[in-house]
Image (tube, helix red, strand yellow):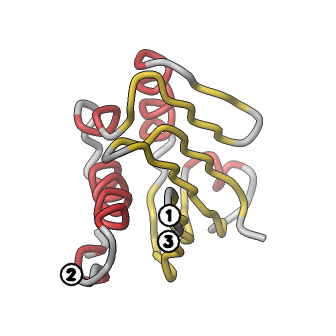
Amino acid sequence: MLEPLALLDNEKPHKQEIAMSKVLISEALNLVRCPECFSEPALVEFGPSLYRDRAALEKWHKERWTNNMRLLQIHPVDITDDAVTVEGVVISDRLKFWKLTTLSVDARFKFSGEKIVEARYGLRT
């Protein structure tokens, strides 16, 4: 498992810590804590799919874990006033089915206070 906390710098804004905590909680397969990172309501965009409420967020997390999606690498984090972008490399059973070994992705977390109001996951370009 990754040790992303080692990437955190105490001088960095608190939003980076929240975003990285979300990544760590997700890696730990914690279905209770993952949705708690999001405000009510929140939006998650994953490819062509949109998830908008707590039940949908839980469903989305279960789907990721069912397919054994794992984060292999974390690249530099970009921070703006209200957002954090985390770039990385993932693997999953679904990727293996399509004969892909890894996929470069990014996750953009938009904040309101200390909660994520929007998360958009996509291919890194």
Q: Residue at x 70, y 30 (%)?
A: 49
Q: Which residue is mark 2?
A: 10
Question: Whole-Å distance between the Cαs marked 2 and 1?
Answer: 17 Å
State left or right for residue 59 relative to residue 113. Answer: right
Which residue type carries mark 1? Answer: Asp
Q: Which residue is mark 1?
A: 81
Q: Are marks 2 and 3 in contact (CB under 8 Å)?
A: no
Who comes first in sequence, dot 2 or dot 1?
Answer: 2
Q: Which residue is mark 3?
A: 79
Q: Quadrant of residue 13?
A: bottom left
Which residue occupies the foreground of this view, 67 or 12? 12
Q: Residue at x 45, y 35 (%)?
A: 66
Which residue occupies the foreground of this view, 63 or 15? 15
Which residue type carries mark 3? Answer: Ile
State left or right for residue 57 relative to residue 115. Answer: right
Element on which disc 2 rests = loop
